[in-house]
Amino acid sequence: MLYFFKRNAVKIVLGLVVLWALVIFAFSAADATESSKTSNGVTYFLCSLLVSDFDDMTPAAKRAVIRQFSLRVRKTAHFTEYLILGFLLMSAMYVIRKHRTLRSDPALAWLIGTLYAVSDECHQYFVPGRAMMLTDMLIDSSGTLVGVLLGCLIYYLRESCRPGRHDEPARLQARSHPEDLNC
């Protein structure tokens, strides 16, 4: 099974990028009524977990609390969608380059994610009740950047802990101090 994943790693990671881009597109294609219904449902669920006595509130009080948190939940969803996209894009760069990332890879992954965010907001302009918003583009771009940086950190740590991946001076130092390379 591991052989299958190694052999098809590029196809798998690119498939995940495309699949996640389609998920984002599907959320953006929902009209204002459907989008509000989804975000209010998520907000209701989160409020029931995080707001003390939420279940004991009157329906009017619950609506007020949901209204209070709804914008934050929507913007956090934008950020999270694109954080995942940024991480997947960085993963694709890593796999495509066969674990030898170039210095330009994070910038390229961020640029691709940001361009997708811009196209996504342009797409929303044509969806009934939705709007194209610069703030959402900035939030999406920021989420992409954090996802790319998270990917860089994970792959840097992974590579630094792999045997045989260290340069010669580090290996020579490890012979005198083997505890320095324990990962």
Image: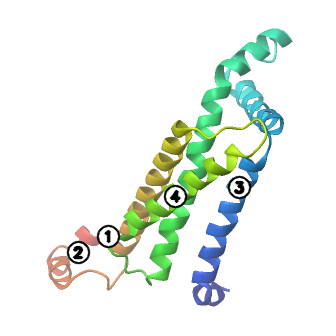
Q: Quadrant of the C terminus?
A: bottom left
Q: Distance of mark 1 from mark 3, alpha carbons? A: 43 Å
Q: Nearer the viewer, mark 4 or mark 2?
A: 4
- Circle 2 is placed at which residue position? 178
Amino acid carrying mark 1 in the image: Asn
| Dot 3 or dot 4, earlier in sequence | 3
Residue 160: quadrant of the picture: bottom left
Please tell me how crowded label 4 is: few (under 14), some (14-19), or many (20+) other residues with Cα within 10 Å. some
- Circle 4 is placed at which residue position? 115
| Mark count | 4
Amino acid carrying mark 3 in the image: Phe
Residue 21: quadrant of the picture: bottom right
Q: Distance of mark 3 from mark 4, alpha carbons? A: 13 Å
Residue 82's place in the image compared with 43, above or below, is below
Front position in the image: 50 or 111 = 111
Q: Distance of mark 2 from mark 1, alpha carbons? A: 7 Å
| Dot 4 or dot 1, earlier in sequence | 4
- Circle 1 is placed at which residue position? 182
